[in-house]
């Protein structure tokens, strides 16, 4: 076993932990509607970078943890993240070939799917969204994808996670 394999699990776990922390940091009122779903961005990155290690099961587990942390319907984010992981795994070979600023368009699509699934489930259980602003986090995620990609790539390379 190489050092990269030994350290890889904790690096991936710490990146998800950092994403959970970023989800809780307050933003100015004007920017709050555009708060990206950091956990989904990290999931998309690891599914693209290490599809043999991070997939639908990890998406489901991280989504369950987010449901517990937010007090949401158990399985709501889990389903959405599992679908996002599946879509990312299905298309990662094409997406990895383009620069991060062009990957951001695919990431926007994944994040929109996630947002729509979460709010569809909310609507089914009786909590429909009030307006179209619920899609704004997908735009924030798209805008921050190149930065998130570069940071996570550098972390992966530094710790030799394979």
Image (cartoon, rainbow, N blue to C red):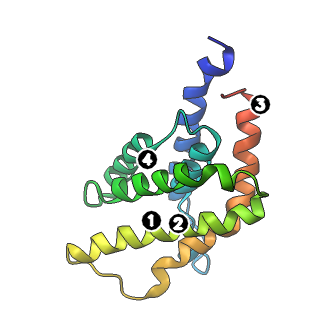
* Rendered image quadrant of residue 125: bottom left
Q: Are marks 1 and 2 in contact (CB under 8 Å)?
A: yes
Q: Residue at x 67, y 28 (%)?
A: 161
Give the mark nearest the N terminus, 3 or 2. 2
Q: Which residue is mark 2?
A: 111
Pick the front one: 5 or 65: 5
Gap between marks 3 and 4, in whole Å? 24 Å
Which of the numbered marks, if any, corresponds to residue 133? Answer: none
Q: Which residue is mark 4?
A: 59
Give the mark nearest the N terminus, 3 or 1. 1
Give the mark nearest the N terminus, 1 or 4. 4
Give the mark nearest the N terminus, 3 or 4. 4
Q: Secondary structure at mark 4?
A: helix
Give the mark nearest the N terminus, 4 or 2. 4
Gap between marks 4 and 2, in whole Å? 13 Å
Q: Position of residue 127 (x, y in %)?
A: 26, 77
Q: Which residue is mark 1?
A: 114
């Amino acid at each position: 076993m190489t050092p990269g394999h030994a350290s890889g699990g904790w690096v991936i776990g710490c990146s998800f932990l950092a994403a959970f922390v970023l989800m809780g940091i307050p933003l100015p009122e004007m920017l709050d509607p555009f708060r990206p779903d950091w956990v989904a961005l990290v999931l998309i990155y690891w599914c693209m970078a290490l599809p043999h290690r991070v997939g639908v099961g990890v998406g489901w587990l991280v989504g369950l943890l987010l449901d517990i942390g937010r007090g949401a319907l158990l399985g709501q984010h889990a389903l959405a993240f599992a679908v996002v992981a599946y879509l990312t795994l299905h298309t990662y070979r094409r997406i990895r070939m383009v620069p991060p600023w062009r990957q951001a368009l695919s990431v926007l699509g994944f994040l929109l799917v996630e947002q729509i699934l979460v709010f569809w489930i909310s609507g089914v259980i009786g909590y429909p969204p009030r307006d179209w602003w619920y899609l704004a986090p997908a735009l924030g995620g798209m805008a921050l994808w190149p930065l998130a990609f570069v940071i996570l790539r550098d972390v992966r390379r530094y710790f030799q996670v394979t």
